[in-house]
Image: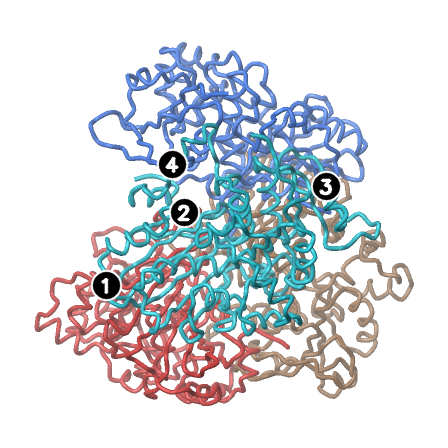
Chain colours: A red, B cyan, C blue, D brown
């Protein structure tokens, strides 16, 4: 197998962009990505990063469409602020590039939800058409549509944790949607970005914990759209954990009828039988943030109340990988018809040895989660 | 004013007992507390602690009823495992001592809820009578009954945060109890006690976050009893924060009718107008764990959904102070007819300067919380 | 005893200023301090803080000499950048105010050492005269000169830890100065100030540790001057700990002749016999950062090599209290002839009960440090 | 290339054993390692771990020599307490196995230094002979002897950081050995092992920092032997950092004559020109703990005093990888004649693309260290 795809990354120096770039440099199907800075060509040198593969300097070029063309770039990653993505994607699409956008620029179809981003072109025919073209790239839910996608809106980190936990219950029709769902999410500080602020100052964050953006977080629209919920059916709140990376969402739901533990487990395992990056934790084990740190896994567990009708789901992932750069690569793998695990897991030489994760026993999964051991 | 009360503390070396003892040594109404170890008198010396006031060694004596009598102890603090408290309280009461028990031994009236503690005497006439005598010592809700109490069951740390947040809504009749309440609580590691375990190992806790005991935490019964809720009306879960101390509870509730922001604020402020240790944070400010660390405050804030009917309450406190040792002293102050703030806040020489906290403006309260500053 | 002294604080909102102000509001000898902002009076309102005593708002006034005069301010605290202190102190002194400056503006007599601060007036007769007037306010070493001081240069946090550890050995003549001393210091992040930077971003600091400013830290000159060392006799380096507050310095020294453990202990204990804020830890105990957090103590311990000639000293303190705001208050207490512990320790009603700390046994001191317990 | 080597691991569930096993499962030259528990075969099942490659359960077998033989094990890893290693290695060697021992059992030749481990066979002809056979496996210093080694004593984590930093200076003859060296080392909590103790309790470690074992740490002998120093020439102390993993050593040394910055840099770079796992940081950059976490790199930087004769070296590594499991694999690679990077770095498909790290520019190295970026 030889490297075949030339990609480019705009925004390789933010936290998400760093993880994305690190993965791309080690991806067996990829040529080293072309790195571009948001600043357009004015003669200055935007800098360089160091290849995580071989320690050599890799230059970051000023962004130019001409350079993309010269280098034969087929796939453009945008790890840029949403305003930039909103502005650049139309031309990228017009030029025939495939685009994976890590920002919130093209995730939302509902004008009202998109309004929180303040785009001025909301509702214009051109942006509506482009929005129509965009695929919300949660691979576990849109795997079959990715090969044809030209524009993939990479999901937000919080929505990935919420949607993956709730999707099996919603699809099964078991969820009592009318009762409403509470999603109490907690994230590490890298989710707040790399720019230093009072909120990310060590002294204000360490040995502390706080809630923010209840009912108003701009990720709320994504969750509502993807799960087809009405605003009144979701209470979504976010909190800042004194850790560097990782998200844990505690999700409270009511079922339409009581279920047994095994029925629930089977439902969730079946839903994710084809999904190597969702690990299912049956009770009494629950996923912890540390289980999925530095990986592309989303871990899902749950506790069923004694009445069999109420449920807490627990969903964990690494906000910079499954919540950003890793999920972007997973989307790419599926867009190009490759094994979705390429570049994202340690893959042995003989690839066929890799099993389907879904039929591992619950006890084994629990041990897996613990990193070990009875 | 001269020191007047002789108390004794059993269990001064655990995390809660340490905080309790530290406060008692500095309390202007108290003689230095007599310190006792759980081990009864067998001639060995159980050790000593150092006075936080003057650095001198204070011996810890083997427990003996005779010693309590000789020293003129009037009030006995039990910072002991619940089995010990369950066993010792009957004799202490019979001997005429007043008792503040920091364990869960006497908090629960419902036999079924108390059963999680595994006491063998549940339902016996003697223990039922003693349980009847015990006052659940959440001072904000039982202030007027404390002067007559002989046995005070000091509340659990989690229940204190949950009950204080919900009490105003329940009393007002606004809470839609039938919809059910979700209480998603998070605690620092000192809540797990001083004995080292795999769960409290630094490597397993730092840069991590996990849920535990959803629907089954033994504090659930306290919350249900005090708020007069049925089990199906409460989803209570707990999580372990990578911090040393502090609790934040995120509580999700529905109201029977939409309210305005000011109506809600007034309701909560009025409820706590007489309560110097409850600080009310009006939106957009929310309490953070760091605001109440090392203090006896319980800070309460909220976010009202745009529909005016759904609510997230945020409640913060220091699990070792307002959640344990400080609350015990607050109970004592009221039992003996003193200002409930004695020994718990910096009190200036001219005590009359101390204002009623309830009429401080919302903006001021918010700044207070921030430790500062516009 | 009634409050008697009116002070003013410029810079009450930085980390050091916050601690200073908190202590002053609770100090039994002080009227509430007048709070001033660096910005001079232009009609805007610089804000307010909340009294830690009673929760009321305390305004921060624009700085004006007229206001200082009107309010009868006798003592001015400057918790300001060193450029501001360098600029304002001459006029304050000329107006007859007493000044405690928490910055580095007036700590250094050697022009070469002071040059690292970049002051343009170094070497001018006026600034030299004022520098001559300034007292380096490490109270343990200058206790007797403080009553007459008009300008006190409050020491840096790192120098306080280094100087207090080494002073007994230097005074005794035991230290082999020619061999040179290594001082490897580590500080929590609050030492880097409140302004958010890449260096104080949680993600860059948590689960990390780094060295900085070896041989070049601007605190080096203070240590050299106070200990009368030549530059070649000190290797001083600093490191950033992933904690909020606290300093630990590990100091390596050679002695001119072998000593016994008890000789060394006696030497250090005697040196600090009059110093209630220095706690001496005899082996095998060593101070830890947590022992002195949130206090004005400097804790000193040591390990003697088997040869009796080499020594590691360990010195711990809270960089915001003994390293800044608390030490400033300790200086004030001595300037005004009060007990140096006023406002800095829990003092019982009957003040005479407070013992001399120096005669507490080593074992007791060790327990004290541990916060407890055998 | 097909997997060729069968190894076995005793102790796969400790922190070092976990990292070792994780690396071996992903190593392209290795069959999956046979996992063994310390308990010998009594019929009980010691448990299982989960393959980090494919999520399947991998059993942990009771230890038996017969099983090693049946499975064709050629290389035995011991991640066991030193008493166990001391006891088992003689038979393993006698049976013709190659052994990499991660404990301190066979690292020390000097009986006096080895005595700190309390072995009863010290000085016996058999153990002396075996000790003679053992190679102290710091690959950067013994690369050429590893192909012939049967018994490799894998170095301690602290000594690896100290020895690698000092070796270039010692070899060059520049180090003023008689002046003595100070090595002030700091380690994350995983270095204290997985068993929960009061010392590793989160509440006692977070927001804290402490020194321990100055002059007496049992790793001291390794450093002395490998660097051929006398005890009086080294002051070695250790500290506990509130982080999960990583070591930073600050090392203070005097040179026999002044050197220039470029002379020093060239000396160190040349020394490690063949060493892909030592990264050299020229001033003004210094390595930080986070640069080498989760990697097999040892990063070395320095600050030269203005006099050109005094030096602080800074050395960082991950105590579980370069300080334990990764170094063990690096040793194995060299024992079997493979590229020492196999299984330890992301290696692209075309392995020849991997450059020699030594000729990367200083600026590039600095960026590499930062994980990025100008």
Regarding residue C204, the answer to whether it shows in the image is: no
Tell me the quarter of the picture where residue A122 sits: bottom left
In the picture of the structure, the residue carrying the numbered disc 4 is: B355
In the picture of the structure, the residue carrying the numbered disc 3 is: B71
Local SS, label 2: loop
* Percent x, y of residue A87: 17, 64
Would you say D66 lies left or right of D272 here? right
Residues at marks 3 and 4, CA–CA distance in whole angstroms: 37 Å
For marks 3 and 4, the one nearer the N-term is 3
In the picture of the structure, the residue carrying the numbered disc 1 is: B308
Whether pointer 3 and pointer 4 mark residues with C-beta atoms closer than 8 Å, the reply is no
In the picture of the structure, the residue carrying the numbered disc 2 is: B275
Of residues C4 and D170, the one nearer the viewer is C4
Residues at marks 1 and 2, CA–CA distance in whole angstroms: 26 Å
* Percent x, y of residue D220: 73, 50
Whether pointer 2 and pointer 3 mark residues with C-beta atoms closer than 8 Å, the reply is no
Residue D189's place in the image compared with A125, above or below, is above
For marks 4 and 2, the one nearer the N-term is 2
């Amino acid at each position: 197998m030889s490297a075949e795809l030339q990609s480019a990354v705009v925004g390789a120096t933010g936290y998400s962009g760093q993880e994305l770039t690190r993965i791309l440099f080690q991806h067996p199907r990829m040529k080293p990505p072309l790195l571009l800075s948001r600043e357009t060509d004015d003669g200055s040198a935007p800098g360089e990063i160091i290849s995580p593969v071989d320690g050599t300097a890799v230059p970051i070029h000023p962004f130019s469409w001409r350079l993309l063309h010269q280098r034969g770039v087929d796939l453009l990653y945008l790890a840029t602020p949403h305003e930039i993505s909103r502005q650049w994607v139309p031309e990228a699409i017009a030029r025939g590039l495939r685009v994976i956008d890590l920002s919130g620029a093209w995730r939302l179809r509902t004008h009202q939800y998109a309004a929180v981003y303040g785009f001025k072109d909301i509702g214009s025919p051109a942006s509506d058409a482009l929005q129509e073209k965009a695929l919300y790239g949660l691979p576990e839910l849109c795997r079959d549509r990715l090969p044809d996608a030209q524009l993939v809106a990479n999901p937000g980190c919080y929505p990935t944790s919420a949607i993956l936990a709730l999707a099996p219950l919603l699809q099964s029709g078991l969820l009592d949607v009318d009762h409403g769902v509470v999603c109490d999410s907690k994230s590490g500080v890298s989710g707040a970005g790399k720019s230093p602020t009072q909120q990310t100052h060590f002294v204000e964050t360490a040995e502390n914990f706080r809630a923010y953006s209840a009912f108003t977080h701009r990720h709320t629209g994504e969750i509502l759209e993807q799960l087809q919920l009405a605003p009144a059916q979701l209470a979504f709140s976010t909190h800042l954990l004194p850790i560097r990376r990782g998200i844990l969402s505690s999700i409270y739901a009511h079922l339409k009828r009581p279920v047994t533990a095994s029925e629930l487990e089977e439902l969730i395992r079946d839903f994710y039988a084809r999904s190597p990056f969702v690990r299912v934790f049956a009770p009494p084990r629950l996923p912890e943030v540390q289980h999925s740190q530095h990986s592309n896994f989303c871990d899902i567990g749950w506790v069923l109340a004694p009445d069999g009708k109420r449920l807490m789901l627990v969903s964990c992932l690494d906000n910079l990988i499954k919540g950003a750069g890793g999920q972007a690569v997973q989307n790419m793998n599926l867009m190009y018809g490759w094994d979705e695990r390429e570049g994202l897991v340690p893959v042995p030489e003989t690839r066929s040895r890799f099993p389907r994760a879904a039929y591992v026993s619950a006890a084994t999964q629990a041990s897996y989660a613990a990193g070990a051991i009875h």
